[in-house]
Image (cartoon, rainbow, N blue to C red):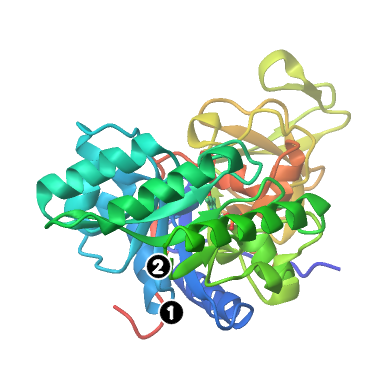
Amino acid sequence: MRHFAHTPAMSGRPQAGQITVDLKAIADNVGILRKHSPGAGFMAVVKGNAYGHGLVEVSRTALDAGAGWLGTAQLAEAVALRQAGITAPILAWLYLASSDSGTIRAAVENSIDVSVGSIEALEAVAAIAKERGTRAQIHLELDSGLSRGGARPDEWAKLVEAAAAAERTAGPGGVGVRGIWTHLAWADVPVHPGNAAAVAGYEAAVGQARAAGLEPELRHVASSANLLARPEYHFDMVRAGLAMYGLSPADHLDPADFGLRPALSATAPLVMVKKVPAGTGVSYEHKAITHETRYLGLIPLGYADGIPKDISGRGIVTVAGARVRVMGKVCMDQFMVDLGPDPRGIRPGDMAQLFGDPAAGAASADEWGEAIGSHGDEIINRIAPRLPRTFLPVAGRA
Ligand SMILES: *Cc1c(COP(=O)(O)O)cnc(C)c1O
């Protein structure tokens, strides 16, 4: 049984769609996740503009709430964090390994740890560290079955030997192996037996690294789902994305069961409410047709804003405390919802909740994800940068 809260029309009548990011939710979620991973360090994963939430704002909030590390895929995002004045440890794991790489140079100059999963990457990072006369901190990545980044097990011995040799190299610059990590192919399915096999392979790889003379202080494997479901995979640090944003990290893991709540919500005012007779075709190609007199609400968000195109018939928008169905194809900047045969006093300017916190009556981004055969992260990652984001501060902070 869901509880629907009535959304009061905001004062000042917003004219267009809005994204609100509740930083208190991020902070509270970090606190909850840290309780579920006692004894392990906590990396807040902020790749993809912090899953569409806002890179710098989320990073600051997560660090204040107790995260010790930030993680990005792209080096450019890690550099942006440094440019914003963030000094906490950062790991970035996606870049082109080449010794003339400006991005690697920026990482080394900005004390950003980089993932290394090949001899080429090791050599590129070591060359730049030597040239700069500084020590680059690296995390060796094992490909434990995802076939994405990282060295495959048959290349691992060569990589750890080379890394150990590079670490021993005397001189002002060089590399230090701070971490050894992997990302699991079944990361989002904690019950899958593939995880145990991959983690066993990972532990063997750590053993090989130690035998080669490396002393990595940070072993890290678990992302959100295994953080919540598999304490035995926590090792020295966990890397949390989805759960920190209050989204479901695995099919059977409901964030609400852990007290986690979504931080991001999308709302828009109804810009028009119109009565149409039975038999009226709605939106392009009349994919939806009214069977009786209906009231339609016009929502000023469309696929240019990241709203999926094919959600006609889905009851995933909340207006005046009730779910209403999307009617017809979503257009580039707008779409229609079916307010029913009686508009119940709903007027232009009343707010529609698209996705957000189910406890506040909104459908979750995960529900939107299900509507397109995907997950909530795809929905929030699609949100267009053009939409204004309003950040609700953590209480007590400016
Ligand atoms: C995205 C990502 C994470 C976070 O995963 P979630 O399921 O969102 O918690 C962790 N580690 C790596 C390498 C990732 O790419």
Point out residue 373 in the picture as x, y percentages from the top left corner.
76, 37
Residue shown at the point (58%, 25%) measured from the top left: 331
Q: CA distance from mark 1 to mark 2?
A: 9 Å
Q: Is mark 2 within 8 Å of ligand 1?
A: no
The answer to whether 231 is drawn above or below residue 96 in the figure is below
Figure quadrant of residue 168: bottom left
The circle on residue 14 is none
The amino acid marked with disc number 2 is Trp
The amino acid marked with disc number 1 is Gly
Looking at this view, is 276 or 43 the one in front? 43
* Count of all numbered marks drawn on residues in the image: 2
Figure quadrant of residue 154: top right
Looking at this view, is 239 or 26 the one in front? 239
Figure quadrant of residue 351: bottom right
Q: What residue does disc 2 label?
A: 69
Residue shown at the point (42%, 57%) measured from the top left: 71
Q: What residue does disc 1 label?
A: 66
Task: Tell me if residue 299 can be seen.
Answer: no
Q: Is residue 149 left or right of residue 136?
A: right
The residue carrying pointer 2 sits among few (fewer than 14), some (14 to 19) or many (20 or more) residues within 10 Å by Cα, namely: many
Point out residue 151 in the picture as x, y percentages from the top left corner.
52, 41
Q: Is residue 176 left or right of residue 186?
A: left
What quarter of the picture does the C terminus occupy? bottom left
Q: Is residue 126 left or right of residue 210?
A: left
Of all residues, the one furthest to the top in this rendering is 285
The answer to whether 108 is drawn above or below residue 90 in the figure is above
Point out residue 231 in the picture as x, y percentages from the top left corner.
69, 73
The answer to whether 247 is drawn above or below residue 301 in the figure is below
Task: Tell me if residue 218 can be seen.
Answer: yes
Residue shown at the point (19%, 31%) measured from the top left: 100
